Amino acid sequence: MSWIFDEEVLAVLAAIAVIAAVFGGSQVIYAGRVVEPFSELGLLGPSERIGDYPRSVVAGSPFQLNIYVGNHEGKAVYYRVLVKVGDKSSIINASIPLSAEPIMDIRIVLGHNSSRIIPVNITLYEPITNARLVFEMWVYNESDGAFRYHGRWNQLWINVTEPASTVSFQQHGGALSLSPDIEAKITEAYAAVRRAEGAGGDITEMITLLNSAIESASRGDLEDAEKLLETVLLLEPKVTEAGVELSRLKFYTTIIGLAIASSVCVGLYLYLRSNLWLLWAKAHREWRVVWCNKSKGERDDRKRKSGGPANLEYRSPLSVADMISGPGALNPDPRAAARELYRMVKAGTIKIYDLNPPRTFSSFLISRYNAGFISSLLILALGIICIYISESQRTSMALGASMVSDNFNLLLSTFSAAITFTRYALGSIMVLFLPGYSLVEALYPSEGDLSPLERLALSIGLSLALVPLIGLILNYTPWGIRLTPIIIATTLLTAMLLLASAYRKFTLLKSTTSANHN
């Protein structure tokens, strides 16, 4: 993985790091602000995948579909999904909803950047050919206190056939409508959620209780629904107060975190700028140096140009340590000597080889020869840990809001923010770099096969091609496109390609070692 040390690659990586830092800082500054808010409405088959939709159903027999609702509006939103039935002559678009009575009314409240798959059992009672089953998204408008058509809709063409035997159906008159009294209490609770959210509070528990109340009201259990709605209203002052304190703490934590991160990056850059090549030389200090097809006169000329002693006798073999700090050092300054030696290795003027390379594949896997393999697996492991810790934090934060002290909640929130930022950094590498990097290393194990910039560009480009293919394949499996299947599939693919690249590199090392000994 020494190609990472190439100056051009380091310059590109530095530029990417600067862009990522600017983007990350802007996300912190503009946290909670959404430039282009939008909502998602999707229709999934019985197995929660795109496709596999029923094409023909029997009148009076229920069939299952799944509705996907996603919120990216920058705030908590109260959604209604109305299910209607039309035909070929029905008119619906982004401005005009279908003019028909709904047969189902699905309601849900979602926080920003959250989604839900809602299973629904639908029954159509009238036989019809090419029925147009329409799903419309409506959003509660706080300013006028009513639901408005949001312009999102989906449809499914379906044939409804007559049953084999004559059966009498008790057909419902339409979607279950909530009483004005319970509807008013739900909207009041939703307004409390929005006020607490505006104060920066964690409204996870409030949304969960509110959705439970909506489900109870839809079942006709009004007493349970009213109790849940009262709990939501009682939580508002506590969540609001905690939100104000948490916002203040996040501000100070962000400032301190950015200062520490900036100091570490600047210090690391200054240190590596003067010591990177010296560290590389120290890691190879016992390796032997071999000049490549150069006469003694050419070598002395090379020495004079590089600033080293012109009367050096090029005995064979010399070690890297001799070239850096020994009597035959390329430069009195060890750092300059190490940089010159690295350039000579890359230019092919000299070669360096290990006297005691790994003899078996198992020893090669955990050696410095395979640093890319070890580093990649470490990033994968840490990334997966951060992903699942941050996912579990959502549940623990909701639990902690009601069962532990406010100070612990603030500490938990700070820890959750740190884990989330780490997840973003490692997750980006896992998705945007490692899959393509592992494939490139497996196809071109020798560093001379590609230039460093070509390796970097191909690693990013192939990652952008492989990851969508993984999602496409998972969509047609029983597991679907979910977090855990995607992580498992991506990790397994990357690990297998890394293992293949390690074996090919070990094969090249054996052949190179045999050639050096001969």
Image (cartoon, grey):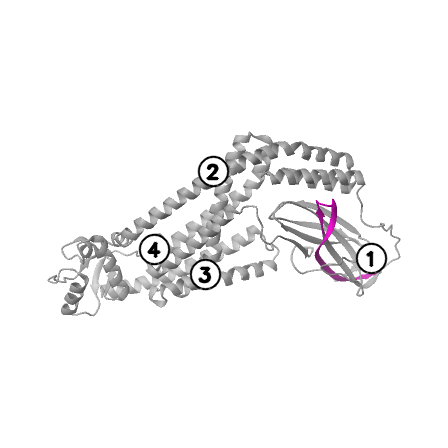
Question: Which one is closest to the eye, mark 1 or mark 3?
Answer: 3
Specify the quadrant of the image occupied by residue 455.
bottom left
The spot of residue 294 in percent (x, y) is: 19, 69
Q: Position of residue 58 (x, y in %)?
A: 81, 58
Q: Find disc 1 in the rendering and name its residue.
A: 59
Q: Earlier in the sequence, mark 3 or mark 4?
A: 4
Of the two numbered discs 1 and 2 on the same chain, state the one appearing first in sequence: 1
**For the residues marked 4 and 2, what is the alpha-carbon distance in whole angstroms?**
46 Å
User: Magenta span covers which residues?
Assistant: 138-161
Residue 190 lies, in percent from the top left, at 69, 40
Q: Is residue 158 magenta?
A: yes
Q: CA distance from mark 4 to mark 1?
A: 66 Å
Decide which of tag 3 and tag 2 comes sooner along the chain.
2
**Of marks 4 and 1, which one's residue comes earlier in the chain?**
1
Q: Are marks 3 and 4 in contact (CB under 8 Å)?
A: no
In the image, taking residue 95 as reference, residue 372 lies left or right, namely left
Please name the residue that numbered disc 4 is placed on. Answer: 364
* Mark toward the viewer: 4 or 2: 2
- Residue picked out by circle 3: 460
Kindly state the secondary structure of the residue where label 4 is placed.
Answer: helix
At label 4, which amino acid type do we have? Phe
Residue 252 circle label: 2
